[in-house]
Amino acid sequence: MGIDVLVSDDLHLSRFALAALLERREEVRVVGPAESNFAALQFAETHRPDVAIIGFEGEDSDAITIAEKIAHLGCRSMLLATAVTRSVVRQAFDAGIAGIVERSVSPRQFVEAIHRVHQGERVFDAELTVAALSNSDCPLSAREFSVLEHVARGDTVREIAGRMHLSQGTVRNYLASMVTKMGARNRIDALRIARDARWI
């Protein structure tokens, strides 16, 4: 029985390269490359692919949400990421996403991950997952974690708002909540506490 795979990636060359790679496999059928996460969700709602591969660049906060919605449709969803942090693993795991594969893996490993996900397995880096899920004492929500990661990269409130598709006021509210929950003096102190605790 073949595997119907949806490939969603806003990087055009990457999307077509992935589709071409998968189409060389007799057991895989690429049922619809999508150029955006929203297009992927619309396609999944109509066609119900077996596996949906969603490109994730770290700053795209929609990817996890879309992958979660696709998973709730009964499709297996998997993130294809440039880089993975523990907070992303935690969010994806909690959202019921079937796995995360880094873009640096070999074509063989990528295809194997699709097969494993299709068979009902969850494909996450074991060491990173253990580290992510062991932070049970961390008080921050998934969104607050995302904001904190942007702070760690040196982003301003305006930049965080733009990248997370939030208002600047909402970002400030997340920052204030984060500082309060962590008992920090300010956002920089909150970042220090999070790093010391190895939450990020």
Image (cartoon, rainbow, N blue to C red):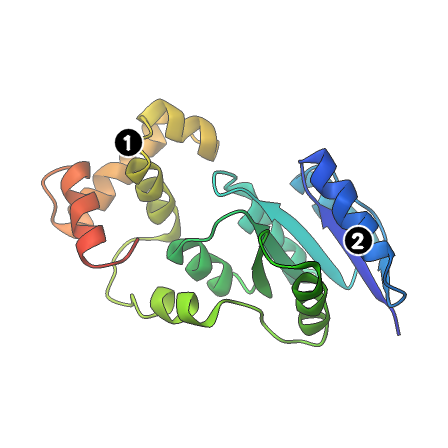
Q: Residue furthest left?
A: 185
The reply, left or right, for residue 120 in relation to residue 149 is: right
Q: Quadrant of residue 199?
A: bottom left
Name the residue beneath numbered marker 2.
Answer: 21
Q: Is residue 30 visible?
A: no
Which residue occupies 70% across, 41% down? 14
68 up-or-down from 62: above or below = below
Determine which of the numbered discs, if any, sits on residue 40 in the image.
none
Q: Which residue is mark 1?
A: 172
Give me the residue at 42% from left, 68% from top. 129
Which x, y percent locates residue 76?
68, 64
Mark 1 to mark 2 CA distance (whole Å): 43 Å
Other-residue count near label 2 (Cα within 10 Å), few / some / many at <14 / 14–19 / ≥20: some
Q: Quadrant of the N terminus?
A: bottom right
Residue nearest the viewer, comparing 34 with 104 = 104
SS type, badge 2: helix
Mark with earlier residue (1, 2): 2
188 w.r.t. 24: above or below: above
Taking depth in this image into account, of 27 and 33 the one nearest to the observer is 27
Residue 160 is situated, as x and y percent measured from the top left of the image, at: 38, 31
Residue type indicated by callout 2: Leu
Q: Quadrant of residue 33?
A: top right
Amino acid type at circle 1 is Arg
Q: Residue at x 53, y 47 (%)?
A: 82
> Most extreme residue toward the top, as rendered?
158
Camera-side mark, 1 or 2: 2
**In x, y percent, where is residue 13?**
73, 36
Asked if residue 181 shows in the view, the reply is yes
Q: Are marks 1 and 2 in contact (CB under 8 Å)?
A: no
